[in-house]
Amino acid sequence: MIMIISNYLGVIVLFIILIQIKNMILSNFRFKLFRIRHKLFILASEPNSLKYDDDLYRELEQNINSLIRFAHRNSYFETLIFSLWFKIKYPNIRKVTRFSMVLSKFFKENRDKRLKNEIENILTDVETSIFKYFLSTSPIFVLVTLVKVFVFFIKKCCEKNQKILASLKMFIISDFKSSLNKIYFQNEKSSSNLGLC
C-alpha cells in the first residue's frame, strides 16, 4: 500500500517539477526578449541612428512586445498547422507582413552599415530566442527540425552525387521491407498462437 502511494506521489511531484521547468523556460524566454527590446531602445537613443517614431522601430518593438505578451500562447504545433493550412488554402499567395515590408524598405534605403548590422543582430537574437524556446518546449519542433536537416542533407548529397541518393533510397526501402517482414512475422506468430491460421 505504501509503495502504491509513494508511486503516485512520485508521479505528482514529477508533474509539478515539469510544470515549473516549463514556467522557468517561459520566464527565461521573456527575459531574453526584454533584453533584446532594451537593446533596441538603447540603439534608438543613440545619435544618427533609428528614431523612436521610425516605422522600423515601431514595428520591431511591437513584434517583440507581442512575443513577450503572448509567449505563453506560442506553440510550434499551432504555427505548423497554420502554415500547412495556409499553403493548402492559398498555394499561390506569399505571406507578406507589414513588418517584412518595413524591414525590406529599411535595408534598401538605409546606407548606414553599422545600423544595418545592429538591426540584423537584434533580429538574429529574436529568432535565436524563439528557436531555443521551441526547442525546449516542443517535441514536434525537434522532430520536424531533424527531418528538415535530414532532407537538406539528402538534397546536398543528391546534388553532388546521384549514386549516394540511389544507395540511400535502397537502404531505406530495404530497411522498411525488413521492418514490414518483422511485423508480418509477429502477426503470423500471434495468429498461429491464437489458432487463427
Image (cartoon, rainbow, N blue to C red):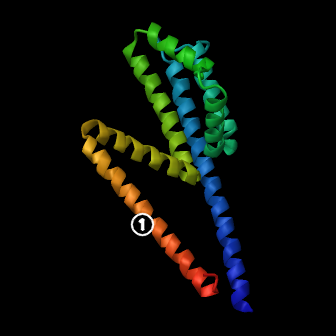
Residue drawn at point x = 40 percent, y = 12 percent: 112
Residue drawn at point x = 58 percent, y = 23 percent: 60
Q: Position of residue 57 (x, y in %)?
A: 57, 19
Q: Position of residue 125 (x, y in %)?
A: 48, 35
Nearer the observer, 102 or 16: 102
Residue 97 against residue 65 in the figure, above or below: above
Residue 197 against residue 74 in the figure, above or below: below
Element assignment for label 1: helix
Quarter of the figure with the N terminus: bottom right
Q: Position of residue 184 (x, y in %)?
A: 52, 71
Residue 142 relative to residue 91: left or right: left
The residue wearing badge 1 is: 178
* Quarter holding residue 79: top right
Residue drawn at point x = 58 percent, y = 84 percent: 192
Nearer the observer, 134 or 177: 177
Residue 113 against residue 187 in the figure, above or below: above
Crowd around label 1: few <14 · some 14–19 · many ≥20 (10 Å)? few
- Kind of residue indicated by mark 1: Ser
Residue 57 against residue 186 in the figure, above or below: above
Q: How many marks?
A: 1
